[in-house]
Image: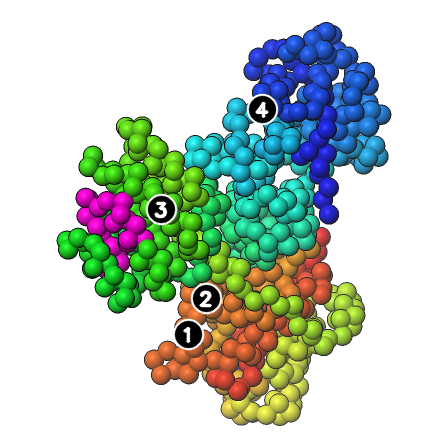
Amino acid sequence: MADLDALFFPKGIAIIGASAKPLTIGNRVMTNLLRYGYPHPVHPVHPKADEVLDRKAYPSILDVPDDIDLVHVIVRNSLVPKVLEDCAAKGVKVAIVNASGFRETGEEGAALERQIVELGHELGIRLFGPNCQGVMNSDPSVKLYSNFTFAQMNPGHVSIVAQGGGVAEVINNYFGMNGIGQRFYASNGNACDISIPEIIEYYGQDDQTHVIVLHVESFADPDEFLEKVAPVAAKKPVLALKSGSTPEGARAVSSHTGGLMAQDTTSDVLFDKCGVLRFASLAELCEAAAAFNGQPVPRGNRIGMVTNAGSPAIIVTDEAVKAGLKVPDLAPESKAFLADKLQSIASVANPIDMMATASGAEFSVSLQALMDDPGIDAAVICFMTPFFVDTAGIAQAIEAQVAKTDKTLIAVAMTNPDEKPEWRETVERVRAAGVPVYYFPEAAARVLTNMDRFRRLTERPRQAPPAIEADREAVARLLAEATPGPDGFLPPAVTSQALAAYGVPLAEERRAATRDEVLAAAEATGYPVVLKAEAPSLVHKSDAGGVALGLADADALGAAFDAMTDRLSGTADLAFLVQRQAAPGLEVIIGGAHAAGSQKMVMFGLGGVHVEVLKDVVFKLAPLSEPEATEMLSGLRSAALLDGVRGQPGVDKAALVDALVRVGRLLADHPAIAELDINPLLAYPPGAAPVAVDARIKIATD
Ligand code: ADP
Ligand code: MG
C-alpha cells in the first residue's frame, strides 16, 4: 500500500533553494505554503541569506532545527545528489525535486536522473519529480500548498494527479472557476520514483477523495498501472485523459492485428481493463468531473428535462439521443400531475417546457414529476434568466429536490452571472447544492453520456478468466525450439500445434511436399479438400495464387497442384497444406498483439476481406474472462451480423467466446508470442463448432 503521508501530510517542510526574488520557484513555493496556512514549520535553506520572506534561513538542511518530513529541492541539477545525501542525514522522508535538467533534456540528464533514483533508494528517501510542480492538500489539518502555481484550491473531494504541470493547472483552474472543491493535487513531472499509480493508490485509500482526475502522457510501467489502479477504479470514478501517442501503436507491424491497431489502442485497453473512464478532450473530462463530484451516477440512461426555453432543451435532446441516451415520454401519471399543476400553455411532454414565465414553484412541480417518474433516471434543468424570472426560486426548487432525490440532476444556466448579483447567487446556490451548472446545453448531454459510459463500465460482470486445460510448459518449449522465418513467423505446423494445445478449433490438415504426398494427404483427409502453398515468403497466400478451394476429387486436386507449382515455381522452400474444405460460414478474425509492459491484447472482428475494408475490430487485454469476450462480440459495429440478419442465421456466440478465451490464455501464457492472427475463423449457427482455417504466430525477436 502506498504510504505517501509524508508527502501529503508532512509535519515540517524545508525549501532548499528558497528565494527572496519574486516569481522564482523558490519564492513561490514558500509564499504559497505560508499564505495557504500550513500549520507546521516551514524553513528556508539558502547558502548565503540570513532571512527569506521574514523567516530565518539556514545554510544547509542539516542546520534546520525542527524535524523535516518534506523538502523542495530547487537547486542546479548537478547539486541534487549532494542535497539528497544531506536530506537523508537529516531524516527527510520525501523530496519534491522541482529542479529540472534531467530526463527531459536528453541522455546526460537521464543518466543524472537514474543516479538520483538509485541514491534515493540507497538513502531511503522518496523522490517526487524531478522537473515537476509539487503537491497540494486542502485538508484543514495541513493546508498544504507545496507548489509554485498561482491557483489555490478550495477544499472538496476531487483529487488530481497529472504528469503534465500545464494540464494539471488547467484542470485546477476549471475547478476553481466552477466552484468545485478539491482534495489532493499532484503534478509529478518526470515521475522518476513516486509513480502516478502509487499516487492513485493513495487517493484510493483516502475517504475524502470521491473522484480522481488523471492526466498521463505515457505509462512508465503499464503492469504497475494495472495492478494499482484497477482496485481503485472499482471503488471510485477515475477519469482520465491520455495525451500523446504510444510508440507501441506507431511501431511498424506486419500482421493484420498490428495493422488494425489505432495509435492509442494500447491505452484504451489498459484503461478499459482497469475500469478507468477515458476522455478524448480535457474540457469534457473537467465537465464530467464536476458532475461526478456532486451527483450520483444515474441508474439508467433515461433523461428527463425541464426548461423555461424550448430550443435549448431540443439541443440537449438531440445530443443525448445521438449519443444513445433515451429521452422517453413521461408516465401518464406524471403528465396528469403536470397538467393539473402547470399553466395550460406549458408542454407536459419530455422536455417539460414551462415557458419563459415559469416561477420557482413551477420548476419545483416539474422537477418533482421527473423525480417521481419511474421511467426517468436523470434530469436536466435548463433555464434562461429573463428579467421577470425569479431565479432565486429556481435555486430553491433545485435545493429542495437535491435533499430528497437520489436521481441525477444537471443544470444548464444560460445566463451571464456578471450581469446581476441575483443571477450569480442563483448559479452559486445551485453549485453549492452539488448540482453542476453548465452554460451550453450540449454540455449537459455530454456529461450524462459520459456518466452513462461510466455506469456501463462499472456494471460489467467481474469474473476471473476461466482455466484452460493446456500443457503450458510443452507449448513454451515448442515455441522456444521452433525456428521462426526471417520475419519472425513460426512454421505453420508449429502454429497449428500451439493453437491446438489450447483447444482452438482447427480445420483438419496435413502437410505434404510432393504431388504424391499431397494426393495421399487428401485421401486421408477426405474430399472435398483445399490445397494451400506454404513458404516463408508467402504472407497472403491467395494473393499469390496459393489457395485452391473446393477440390472435389483427386483429378481436381492434381490439376490444382500442377497449376500452383507452375505459378509458384521460383518460391524458396515451397511446401503444401491439404485441409478439409470447411462449410461456408461467417468469417471472423481473432488476433493478438503486444499491448504494453508484459500485457498482451486480443483482437476480434469480421474477418476475410471485410477486415481491411471495414476495420470493424475490438481489442481487450489478455487473458479474457467470458463476460469480457462477450463484450468484444457486442462491441463490433456490425455486431448484429453475429445474431443473423435478413433471414440469415446467426452464429454460435458461445463458441466464439470460447475461442477468444482460449486465444487470450495462449497469449497471456506465452511472452514469446509477439503477434497472432487467425484469419479466418469460420463461425457457424448455434450448435456447430467454429473452425480456424488460417493462422500465423509471430515470435518476439527483441
Ligand atoms: P490467405 O489469408 O493467406 O490468403 P487463407 O488460408 O486464409 O489464405 O485462405 C483464403 C480464403 O480461403 C479464406 O479467407 C477462406 O475464405 C478460404 N478458405 C481457406 N481455407 C479454407 C477451408 N479449409 N475451407 C473453406 N474455406 C477456406
Ligand atoms: Mg487468411
Front disc: 2 or 4: 4
> CA–CA distance between discs 4 and 1?
60 Å
Residue range highlighted in magenta: 348-367
Q: Position of residue 233 (x, y in %)?
A: 59, 53
Front disc: 3 or 1: 3
Residue highlighted by disc 4: 36
Residue highlighted by disc 3: 398
Q: Is mark 4 within 8 Å of ligand 2?
A: no
Q: Residues within 10 Å of mark 2 (few under 14, many from 20)?
A: some
Name the mark on residue 636: 2
Residue at the image position 59 percent from the left and 56 percent from the top: 234
Q: Residues within 10 Å of mark 3 (few under 14, many from 20)?
A: many
Labels 3 and 1: the sequence-earlier one: 3
Q: Residues within 10 Å of mark 1 (few under 14, many from 20)?
A: some
Residue at the image position 79 percent from the left and 70 percent from the top: 473
Labels 2 and 3: the sequence-earlier one: 3
> CA–CA distance between discs 2 and 4?
51 Å
Mark 1 secondary-structure assignment: helix
Name the mark on residue 641: 1
Q: Nearer the viewer, residue 450 or 352?
A: 352
Q: Position of residue 549 (x, y in %)?
A: 50, 82
Labels 4 and 3: the sequence-earlier one: 4
